[in-house]
Image (cartoon, rainbow, N blue to C red):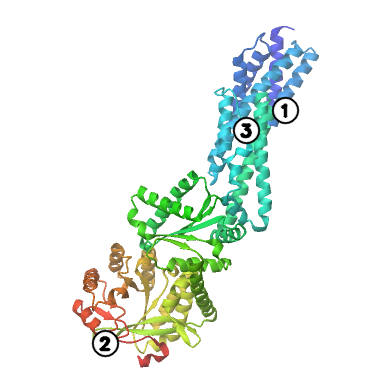
C-alpha cells in the first residue's frame, strides 16, 4: 500500500473519531460555526500525519500536542474521561486497521507514538486545569484565605516546576501547615463553639478534608515526577474539591457564628475561662467618643484592631478580637507570662497605635478594662453582659482598670439593681402598666405653652422615673416596644389634656422613627390629638436627628407632624443639620440641655456659653427656646435677661403630676 493510500485511510479514521467527538455535549456547546469544525479537522489531520507518517518525530510536535490538551480543557471544557475515550477509540481503530492491512504502518511503533502523544495531550490538560484551579482559588474571596495561603502558594510552586522554572517540587508538610496551627487557635475554637452539639462533627470533617487535601497534594508531586498526568489530573481535582469542602465547612461555621456572634463570644469565653484557669486573659477597649462622630469611633476601633492583630501576631500570641461598639480582646495566656506583663503589653500597644496615627490626644477618651475572669462568681451569660454594661458606665480618672475581685463585687450590686429594674420594665411593657405624668412648660406670663408627657413605672407604691430606666431600655433593645406603649397609652388622655393646652410633647428613642409599625402608631396618635385641638410634638435628642432627617421631613410633609430638639448643647451639635431643620420648618421648639442651666447663678462661664447658645438658636429662627431644670426665681431672671423668646420648664413652676391630676398643677 502506497503512502497516499495510507494517508487517505488515516484521514477517514480521523474523520470518524472527530464525528464521535462532536457527540460530546461540552464540545458541541463550544462549537460556534461549520468553519470551526473544518479547522479542527484540518489541524487533527496535520498532527496525525506528522505523528504517524514521519520517520522521526521532534519535540515541537509534542509541544503542539500539549497545546491541544490545554485548548481541549480551557476552550472546550472536555472531561479527562471523554478525552481518554477519544484517544483510546482512535488507538483501537488504528490498530484494527493495521491488523486488517487497511493501513500499512508498524503496529508497535504506532502504539508507542500514540501513547507518547497521549501523555503530551494530558500534560497540557493538567496544566490548563492547574491554571483554572489557581484562578478559582484566587477569586474565591474567602474571609479566611490567609490560613489557606500555604496551599495556594504550593500550587504556584507546582506551576513553576511545570514550566521548568524550578528543578524540584517540595512535599507539603501537614504538621507545618498554617491551617493545622489555626485549627488549635482561639479563633477556630470559637467558630466550632458556634456549632453547639455539631461542633465535633464539624471538627472531624474539617480535619479529614484537610488531611485529604495534603494527601492529594503529595500524590500530585509523586505523579508529576513519574509523568503520570492522568492520575495527576485526578489528584488535582480531588485537591480542589477538598479545598472547596474546607471553605464550605468554615463558611457554614461563620454563618452559625454570625447569627448571634456577641452571645457566642461571651459564652465561649465564660466557659473556657472556667475550665482553663489562669489561661485566658480578657480585655475590653472602649472609646468614649460622642455619638455624632460614630464613624470616627468605628474607624478608630478598626485601626486599633488591625494594628493590634499585627502586634500580637509578632509577639506570637494566640488571640481573638471581637468588635461590637467596643473592642473585645481575648488572649490565651502563655504559662510563662503574667497578667501584669500582658496588661503592660496592651497599654504599650495602644500607645503605639495612637502615636502612629497622631491620635495621642484621644488617649484620655480610651478606657481599657483588664477583666480577671477567674474572679467571676456568676458565669451566666446575661449576668456577665450586665457587668460589662455597668463597667462602661463607671466614671474613673484612670484609663486602664483592672477588674478583679473587689471591683466585681461592687459591679455585682449594680447589676442586681439593674436586673430588678429590667424586670419591672419588661413587666410594664407586657402588662401595659406605664403611668403618664405631665409637666408644664410656661411662657413669660406663666401661661402654659406646652405640656411635656413623662413616663414613669410603678414599683411598690412609688415610681421609677425616666432617669432610672432610659438607658436600660436602650441597652436591652426594648426601645421600640416602649415607644409603642407610650404612643398608644397617651391616646387615653387626649380629652383631659385638651382642657389645659393645645400642645403636648412626648420623648421617643430615635431608633423607633425608622420602624414602620411605630410610624403608623405615631400618625394615628397625632391624628387623634388633632381632632381634639391638640398638636402632638415629638422630642428627639439632638445628636440622633442626623440619621432620621429624611424620615422626619416626610412625616412633616405628609402628616404635619412637627418635632422638637431635646438636649441641645449637650456636646453633639451639628449646625448644618439644625439649619436644615429650621429651613424645612420641622421644629416646634428647641430645648437647651439642663446641664447648661444648672448653676448659672454662680458660674459666669456657663452663663456666657448659654448666652451665645441662645443667640445662635435665635439667629437660626429655632424659637421658642425651652430652658429645662429651672428651679429658682434667680434662674428665671437671668434667662429673661438673655432673651424674651425663652419659655420655662422646671420645679420652680411645677413638678410633674399625673395627667388625671392636671387641675392641681
Label 3 and label 1: CA atoms lie apart by 15 Å
Q: Nearer the viewer, mark 2 or mark 3?
A: 2
Residue at the spot 48% in from the left edge and 73% down from the top edge: 414
Residue at the spot 73% in from the left edge and 14% down from the top edge: 110
Kindly identify which residue carries mark 2: 446
Residue reaching furthest left?
Answer: 641
Residue 428 against residue 34 in the figure, above or below: below
Judged from the image, the secondary structure of the residue bearing numbered disc 1 is helix
Residue 640 against residue 230 in the figure, above or below: below
Point out the tag, 3 or 1, that comes first from the N-terminus: 3
Residue at the spot 71% in from the left edge and 10% down from the top edge: 5
Q: x, y percentage for residue 624?
A: 26, 76
Point out the tag, 1 or 2, that comes first from the N-terminus: 1
Check the picture and name the quadrant holding the C terminus: bottom left
**Crowd band around label 1 with a 10 angstrom C-alpha radius: few (<14), some (14–19), many (20+):** few
**Crowd band around label 2 with a 10 angstrom C-alpha radius: few (<14), some (14–19), many (20+):** few
Kindly identify which residue carries mark 3: 77
Q: x, y percentage for residue 392?
A: 44, 65
Kindly identify which residue carries mark 1: 85
Disc 2 + disc 3, Cβ < 8 Å: no
Residue 640 against residue 118 in the figure, above or below: below
Residue at the spot 24% in from the left edge and 85% down from the top edge: 633
On the rendered structure, is 657 left or right of 445? Answer: right
Q: x, y percentage for residue 654?
A: 33, 87
**Residue 486: which quarter of the image?**
bottom left
Amino acid at each position: 500500500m502506497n503512502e497516499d493510500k495510507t494517508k487517505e485511510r488515516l484521514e477517514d479514521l480521523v474523520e470518524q473519531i472527530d464525528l464521535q467527538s462532536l457527540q460530546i455535549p461540552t464540545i458541541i456547546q463550544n462549537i460556534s460555526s461549520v468553519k470551526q469544525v473544518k479547522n479542527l479537522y484540518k489541524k487533527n489531520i496535520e498532527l496525525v500525519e506528522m505523528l504517524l507518517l514521519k520517520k522521526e518525530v521532534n519535540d515541537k510536535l509534542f509541544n503542539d500536542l500539549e497545546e491541544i490538551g490545554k485548548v481541549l480543557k480551557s476552550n472546550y471544557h472536555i472531561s479527562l474521561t471523554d478525552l481518554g475515550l477519544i484517544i483510546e477509540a482512535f488507538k483501537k481503530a488504528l490498530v484494527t486497521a493495521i491488523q486488517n492491512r487497511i493501513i500499512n504502518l508498524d503496529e508497535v511503533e504506532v502504539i508507542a507514538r500514540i501513547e507518547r502523544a497521549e501523555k503530551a495531550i494530558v500534560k497540557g490538560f493538567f496544566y490548563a486545569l492547574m491554571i483554572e484551579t489557581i484562578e478559582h482559588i484566587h477569586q474565591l474571596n474567602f474571609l479566611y484565605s490567609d490560613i489557606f495561603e500555604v496551599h495556594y502558594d504550593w500550587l504556584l510552586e507546582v506551576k513553576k516546576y511545570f514550566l521548568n522554572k524550578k528543578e524540584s517540587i517540595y512535599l507539603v508538610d501537614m504538621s507545618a501547615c498554617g491551617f493545622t496551627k489555626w485549627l488549635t487557635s482561639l479563633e477556630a475554637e470559637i467558630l466550632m463553639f458556634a456549632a453547639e452539639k455539631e461542633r465535633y462533627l464539624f471538627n472531624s470533617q474539617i480535619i479529614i478534608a484537610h488531611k485529604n487535601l495534603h494527601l492529594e497534594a503529595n500524590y500530585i508531586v509523586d505523579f508529576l515526577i513519574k509523568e503520570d498526568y492522568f492520575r495527576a489530573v485526578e489528584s488535582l481535582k480531588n485537591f480542589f474539591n477538598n479545598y472547596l469542602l474546607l471553605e464550605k465547612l468554615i463558611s457554614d461555621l461563620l454563618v452559625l457564628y454570625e447569627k448571634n456572634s456577641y452571645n457566642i463570644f461571651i459564652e465561649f469565653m465564660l466557659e473556657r475561662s472556667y475550665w482553663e484557669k489562669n489561661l485566658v486573659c480578657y480585655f475590653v477597649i472602649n472609646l468614649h467618643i460622642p455619638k455624632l462622630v460614630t464613624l470616627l469611633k468605628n474607624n478608630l476601633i478598626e485601626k486599633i484592631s488591625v494594628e493590634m492583630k499585627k502586634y500580637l501576631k509578632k509577639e506570637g500570641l494566640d488571640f481573638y478580637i471581637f468588635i461590637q461598639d467596643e473592642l473585645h480582646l481575648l488572649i490565651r495566656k502563655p504559662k510563662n507570662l503574667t497578667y501584669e506583663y500582658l496588661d503592660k503589653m496592651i497599654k504599650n500597644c495602644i500607645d503605639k497605635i495612637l502615636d502612629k496615627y497622631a491620635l495621642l490626644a484621644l488617649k484620655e477618651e480610651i478606657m481599657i478594662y483588664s477583666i480577671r475572669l477567674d474572679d467571676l462568681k456568676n458565669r451566666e451569660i446575661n449576668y456577665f453582659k450586665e457587668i460589662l454594661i455597668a463597667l462602661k458606665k463607671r466614671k474613673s480618672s484612670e484609663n486602664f482598670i483592672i477588674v478583679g475581685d473587689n471591683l466585681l463585687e461592687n459591679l455585682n450590686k449594680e447589676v442586681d439593681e439593674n436586673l430588678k429594674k429590667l424586670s419591672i420594665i419588661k413587666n410594664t411593657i407586657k402588662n401595659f402598666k406605664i403611668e403618664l405624668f405631665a409637666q408644664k412648660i410656661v411662657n413669660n406670663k406663666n401661661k402654659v405653652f406646652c405640656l411635656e408627657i413623662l413616663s414613669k413605672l410603678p414599683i411598690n407604691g412609688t415610681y421609677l422615673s425616666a432617669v432610672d430606666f432610659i438607658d436600660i431600655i436602650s441597652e436591652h433593645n426594648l426601645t421600640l416596644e416602649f415607644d409603642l406603649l407610650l404612643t398608644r397609652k397617651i391616646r387615653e388622655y387626649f380629652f383631659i389634656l385638651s382642657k389645659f393646652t393645645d400642645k403636648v410633647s412626648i420623648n421617643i428613642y430615635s431608633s423607633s422613627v425608622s420602624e414602620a409599625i411605630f410610624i403608623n402608631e405615631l400618625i394615628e396618635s397625632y391624628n387623634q390629638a388633632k381632632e381634639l385641638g391638640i398638636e402632638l410634638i415629638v422630642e428627639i435628642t439632638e445628636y440622633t436627628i442626623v440619621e432620621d432627617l429624611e424620615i422626619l421631613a416626610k412625616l412633616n410633609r405628609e402628616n404635619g407632624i412637627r418635632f422638637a430638639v431635646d438636649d441641645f448643647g449637650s456636646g453633639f451639635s451639628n449646625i448644618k443639620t439644625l439649619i436644615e431643620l429650621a429651613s424645612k420648618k420641622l421644629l416646634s421648639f428647641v430645648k437647651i440641655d439642663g446641664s447648661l442651666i444648672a448653676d448659672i447663678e454662680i458660674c459666669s462661664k456657663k452663663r456666657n456659653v448659654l448666652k451665645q447658645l441662645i443667640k445662635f438658636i435665635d439667629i437660626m429662627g429655632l424659637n421658642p427656646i425651652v430652658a429645662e431644670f429651672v428651679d429658682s426665681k434667680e434662674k428665671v431672671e437671668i434667662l429673661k435677661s438673655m432673651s424674651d423668646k425663652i419659655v420655662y420648664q422646671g420645679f420652680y413652676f411645677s413638678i410633674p403630676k399625673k395627667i388625671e391630676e392636671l387641675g392641681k398643677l
